[in-house]
Image (tube, rainbow, N blue to C red):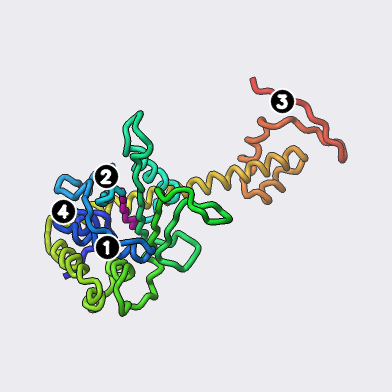
Amino acid sequence: MELLDARNDFIFKKIFGSDSNKDVLLAFLNSTFMEAGEPPLTEITLMNPYTDKNDPKDKQSILDIKAKTAEGKLINIEMQLFNPYNMEKRTLFYWSGMYFHQIKEGGNYSELKKCVTINILNYSFLPNDRYHNVFHLREDHTLIPLIDDIEVHVMELSKLEEYEVPMGGGLVNWLLFLRGVEQTNWEALTVNEPMLKKAMDTLEFLSQDTQTRMEYDARLKFLRDEASRVEGAKAEGVAIGEAKGKEEMARELLTLGVDVSVIAKASGLSEREINSLKPLLPNAFVYGKLIVYSLSYRL
C-alpha cells in the first residue's frame, strides 16, 4: 500500500487537527516548544478542528490548525507543500490577524495573549542549515525583548535530507515522519516519541480509505495548479521587467542618435519594436557630434 503524503495540508490537518487526535497535536507542540527552551503544554483546545465539511477542493480553504492553550496562548500551524512566495509577509499578516481579533473594538489591550505561528515548509527558505528557527521581537544590539507576544517558528523539511534517524526523541522525529522517512525506520522514531505511533496509524488508515484518497488527489491537484500559477506569474513578471529594461536602453540609444540596426543587436529587440518607440521620444537631428532636439507631439 502506498502511503499518502502527510505534507499535503489536507492529510496533515486530518492527522493533527482532529479532536480524536488532539493528543497527537499536543505531543508535537511539546516537542516544538521544548526544543525552543520553553515549558511543555498541559492542555490544548482545537479552535478549528477538522470536519467532513472541510472540502479539500475548495480553492478558498486554508487548511491550517488553530489551537489555544490553557493559559489562552493562541497557536496557528500551517503546512506548505509548495512555495507561495512572500512567506515572511504572509506569516506576519496571519499572525497579526490572530492578535488583532482577540479583543473587540474598545477592548482592553491587557486582554491580548501571546500568538505563535508555526510554519512547516517543504522547501528551503532561510539562509542557514538549521531545520528549526524561532523568531521573536527583540532590540538589535542588546537583544532585549520588546514583548513576548510574537513568536514565529519556521521548520524546513528540506534541511533534513541527510539527517539520520536520531537515537533520542524530539521534534526532529516528527519532522522526519512528515518528510516521509521509510516505514522501516518508523519504529526507531517512536521509541522516544510514543505518540508518533498514533500519527503513523492514522496515516496508514487514511491511506486505505478510498474517499480520502480521492479528496487527497483533488487537493494535490489544486496545490500543484496554484504553485504553477504562482511560478507562471513570477516568470511573467521577470519577463516584463526584462522587456522594460530593454526598451529603456533602446530609448536612451535612440536619443543619442545610434542607428536602429545597432540598437537591435545591443538590446535584442527587433527593428520594428525599436521604431515603435520613436514617437515617444524627442526628434533628434544629428549634426556631427551635436544633437539638436525638437519636441514631438502626438495628435
Q: Amino acid at mark 1?
A: Phe
In space, the residues marked 2 and 1 are separated at their CA atoms by 23 Å
Callout 3 touching callout 1 (CB < 8 Å): no
- The circle drawn on residue 28 is 1
Residue 257 lies, in percent from the top left, at 77, 40
SS label for mark 1? helix
Please indicate, yes or no, whether residue 183 appears anywhere in the rendered image: no
Q: Is residue 222 above or below residue 105?
A: below
Say which residue label 2 marks. 61
Comparing labels 4 and 3, the label whose residue is closer to the camera: 4
Q: Residue at x 34, y 49 (%)?
A: 226
Label 3 or label 1, whichever comes before in sequence order: 1
Callout 4 touching callout 3 (CB < 8 Å): no
- The magenta stretch spans which residues? 74-81
Q: Residues within 10 Å of mark 4 (few under 14, many from 20)?
A: some
In space, the residues marked 2 and 3 are separated at their CA atoms by 54 Å
Comparing labels 2 and 3, the label whose residue is closer to the camera: 2
- The circle drawn on residue 19 is 4
Magenta span includes 170 = no
